[in-house]
Image (cartoon, grey):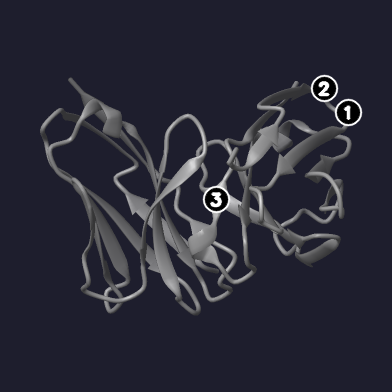
């Protein structure tokens, strides 16, 4: 079992470019959560998705950020027109069931640097 | 706003020492408190606590929750260099899927 796979591990983007972060959940997991960890801060919840559905996007900035989890393929977190303040580590977690904090498994994260 | 505060933010000890990490919280509708260990990769699960006063133990690590005083501690005895990591405390404020994290405690264990 490969665990939760995130790629790329490191991503460098210039201001104004787009960043696409990918998350493949563990086998058998159909629930995906994205968190952002800004420098010197704790992980902050962004969005919770099931296949083809956004369940809770209360932590997602209203502009430039979007997330999807299609029927086939990984979950994608997309950041348009990146700014320096988007530099952070983005972690994805997955679980087999929706109401299952105990079953959370985290990926190793994508470290986004905006230059 | 839900809040989780960890202390100290960083700690340096020698191998063999015992350490206590603290986590206090203020949340609207507490369900559970979780501890994770984060090395230079994915946070890995250590403990989940839901009831006051019941110690969870795994090897040299143990943790306990006090729901009246709204805090938890994580103890590590006979520390080893492999214990060096950031220890994260997180609380489920009632959703059963969304966690509120503290900033973490960076533990460095020197040989």
Q: Which label lies toward us, 3 or 2? A: 3
The image position of residue A25, as x and y in percent, is: 68, 47
Front residue of this view, candidates A94 and B4: A94
Residue labelled with disc 1: A17
Note whether A49 is above or below A113 in the view shown. below
Q: Which label lies toward us, 3 or 1? A: 3
Kindly identify which chain the residue marked by label 2 belongs to: A
Instruction: Report crowding for label 1: few under 14, some 14 to 19, many 20 or more residues within 10 A (C-alpha).
Output: few
Asked if the residue under mark 2 is in contact with the one under mark 1, i.e. CB atoms within 8 Å, the reply is yes
Work out whether mark 3 precedes mark 2 in sequence or the reverse, and give the earlier one: 2
Q: Is residue B23 left or right of residue B58?
A: right
Q: Quadrant of residue B10?
A: top left
The image position of residue A11, as x and y in percent, is: 73, 24
Residue labelled with disc 2: A14
Mark 3–mark 2 Cα distance, whole angstroms, equals 31 Å
Instruction: Report crowding for label 2: few under 14, some 14 to 19, many 20 or more residues within 10 A (C-alpha).
Output: some
Residue labelled with disc 3: A105
């Amino acid at each position: 079992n490969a665990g939760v796979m995130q790629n790329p591990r490191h991503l460098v983007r210039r201001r104004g470019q787009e960043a696409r972060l990918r998350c493949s959940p563990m086998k058998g997991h159909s629930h995906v959560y994205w968190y952002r960890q800004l420098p010197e801060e704790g992980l902050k919840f962004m969005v919770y998705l099931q296949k083809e559905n956004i369940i809770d996007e209360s932590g997602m900035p209203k502009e430039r950020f979007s997330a999807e989890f299609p029927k086939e393929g990984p979950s994608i977190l997309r950041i348009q027109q990146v700014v320096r303040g988007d530099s952070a580590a983005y972690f994805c977690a997955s679980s087999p069931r929706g109401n299952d904090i105990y079953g959370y498994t985290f990926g190793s994260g994508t470290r986004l640097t905006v230059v | 706003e839900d809040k989780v505060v960890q202390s100290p933010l960083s700690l340096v000890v020698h191998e063999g020492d015992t350490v206590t990490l603290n986590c206090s919280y203020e949340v609207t509708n507490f369900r559970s408190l979780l501890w994770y260990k984060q090395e230079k990769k994915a946070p890995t699960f250590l403990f989940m606590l839901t009831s006051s006063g019941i110690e969870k133990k795994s090897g040299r690590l143990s943790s306990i929750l006090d729901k009246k005083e709204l805090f938890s501690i994580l103890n590590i005895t006979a520390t080893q260099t492999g214990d060096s990591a950031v220890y994260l405390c997180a609380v489920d404020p009632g959703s059963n899927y969304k966690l509120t994290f503290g900033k973490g405690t960076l533990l460095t264990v020197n040989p």
